[in-house]
Image: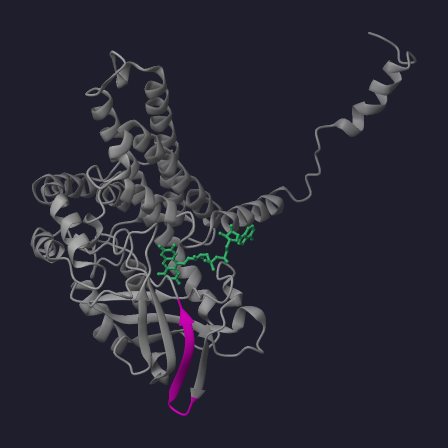
């Protein structure tokens, strides 16, 4: 049973919807044009302009549960708001609620020292700087974080960092000032104690952002991914988060909220796509019929509605569990939505692209960028297969000891006796 929205959420939702109508949708075309013209290494002016307005409207940092810094909403309360922001690529950043900053801010909030909070969290919360999370490496299968090879070596009062990272979101953004870096402090320690996370200011000597990486050929939108080289990068020992060997612990804390936010946003994106699909179907004639009269369109529209509602309910349930029993207890549900929601969004957006014909593959209707966003989320924050593997592991654990294969053991002899004609018939 999903609880009703609180009056606070209803009020925020109303203001958010008005802001979207007044400032976000009318500026979408400008956003795509500026992103394309300026590329992934530049700030997009329309976003900076709208951030000022969003902050003034009090629609700012809604994701952050700690009430003295953010809106103080639970995951369940944040869900409908995050969904609204997800309807368009630009909105989450305008409201200072975008990845990877939200996850990084939560790490700083939970594990940063007072000095870290003052230096990094404060400007992040103010939307003055941006941040990156550097775990994935080109040389190893990084979906298994135990493989991460970069080194973080202690030398006196400093750590020396070496490694090559890629798909570091935000790495090309000139506003990106701080990286949360994952690497090995002790390759000899027990497996889950080898990795650590450390704060690395972007302007530290030895860091080279070598190139922007495209996602399905697009640079910047949907992602400012970068390949970054770290060569003898020295940072103070106090930049270590939580302590040596505690990288996995931090990753667990960071990934729950990060994953559910991705899912909430994708539900919004799928919902908007369905709206576009219906509008197009009611407007376009082919072979003497509106597309909305073709049964295949009706099938796909109905199926999209079913899939979106299923995803939303599963996501709200995961949010409710995170709020009530904690992220660890909700890990199966978090893994389930991380598989189900991007898959749903890919299907819905793919049907929309098909319905829009050639125009669906371009930028005029925002569908190609939407597809890239949904598709990349079948990989980012862990590929589908890894989450399914976790779900299966938890399911086996849940079923352990039941040993019920359907009763075959009990009635098989009776069946064979019947087949032989030796069993008494009723
Ligand atoms: C646009 C984008 C943005 C990203 N942003 C960031 C970021 O900001 N920071 C960051 O650190 N990383 C980021 N990533 C990286 C992302 O998290 C990794 O790509 C992902 O974890 C997979 O790691 P990998 O690429 O090394 O693939 P690999 O680990 O090499 O896996 C490749 C494939 O192997 C298969 N596979 C792996 N494990 C299993 C299994 N257990 N069972 C069955 N099959 C399996 C899957 O099909 C998987 O896709 C981003 C990726 C993209 C595409």
Ligand 1, by image quadrant, is: bottom left
Q: Position of residue 230 (x, y in %)?
A: 37, 77
Residue 378 or residue 86, whichever sits in front: 378
Q: Position of residue 383 (x, y in %)?
A: 47, 51
* Left or right of residue 191, residue 209 in this image: left
* Left or right of residue 166, residue 394 in this image: right
Whether residue 327 is in magenta: the answer is: no
Q: Tell me which corner region of the image, top left, top right, bottom left or bottom right, holds residue 236.
A: bottom left
Is residue 318 at least partly visible in the picture? Answer: yes
Is residue 111 at least partly visible in the picture? Answer: no
- In this rendering, the count of numbered labels is 0
Q: Residue at x 27, y 34 (%)?
A: 360
Q: Position of residue 172 (x, y in %)?
A: 26, 65
Whether residue 160 is in magenta: the answer is: yes
Q: Which portion, as a residue range, is magenta? A: 155-165
* Left or right of residue 388, residue 82 in this image: left
Is 19 drawn above or below residue 240 in the view shown? above
Q: Position of residue 171 (x, y in %)?
A: 29, 66
């Amino acid at each position: 049973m999903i609880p009703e929205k609180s009056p606070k959420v209803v009020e925020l939702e109303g203001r958010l919807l008005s802001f979207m109508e007044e400032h976000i949708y009318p500026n979408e075309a400008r956003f795509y044009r500026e992103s394309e013209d300026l590329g992934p290494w530049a700030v997009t002016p329309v976003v900076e302009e709208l951030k000022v307005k969003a902050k003034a409207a009090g629609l700012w940092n809604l994701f952050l549960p700690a009430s003295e810094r953010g809106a103080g909403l639970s995951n369940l309360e944040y869900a409908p708001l995050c969904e609204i922001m997800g309807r368009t690529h630009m909105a989450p950043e305008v409201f200072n609620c975008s990845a990877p900053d939200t996850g990084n801010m939560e790490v700083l909030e939970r594990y940063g020292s007072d000095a870290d909070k003052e230096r990094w969290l404060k400007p992040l919360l103010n939307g003055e700087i941006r941040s990156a999370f550097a775990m994935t490496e080109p040389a190893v299968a990084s979906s298994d974080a135990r493989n991460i090879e970069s080194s973080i070596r202690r030398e006196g009062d400093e750590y020396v960092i070496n490694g090559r990272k890629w798909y570091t979101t935000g790495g090309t953004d000139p506003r990106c000032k701080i990286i949360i870096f994952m690497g090995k402090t002790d390759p000899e320690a027990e497996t889950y104690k080898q990795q650590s996370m450390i704060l690395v200011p972007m302007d530290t000597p030895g860091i080279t952002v070598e190139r922007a990486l495209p996602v399905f050929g697009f640079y910047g939108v949907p992602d400012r991914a970068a390949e970054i080289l770290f060569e003898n990068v020295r940072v103070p020992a106090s930049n270590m988060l939580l302590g040596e060997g505690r990288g996995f612990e931090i990753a667990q804390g960071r990934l729950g909220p990060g994953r559910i936010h991705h899912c909430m946003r994708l539900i919004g994106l799928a919902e908007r796509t369905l709206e576009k699909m219906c509008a197009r179907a009611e407007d376009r004639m082919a072979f003497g019929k509106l597309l909305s009269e073709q049964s295949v369109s009706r099938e796909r529209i109905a199926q999209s509605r079913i899939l979106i509602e299923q995803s939303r309910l599963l996501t709200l349930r995961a949010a409710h569990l995170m709020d009530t029993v904690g992220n660890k207890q909700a890990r199966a549900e978090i893994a389930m939505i991380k598989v189900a929601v991007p898959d749903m969004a890919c299907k819905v957006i793919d049907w929309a692209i098909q319905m829009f014909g050639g125009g669906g593959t371009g930028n005029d209707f925002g569908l190609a960028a939407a597809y890239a966003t949904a598709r990349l989320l079948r990989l980012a924050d862990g590929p589908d297969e890894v989450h399914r593997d976790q779900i299966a592991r938890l399911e086996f654990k849940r079923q352990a000891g039941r040993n019920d294969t359907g009763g075959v053991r009990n009635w098989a002899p009776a069946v064979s006796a019947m087949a032989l004609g030796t069993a008494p018939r009723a």
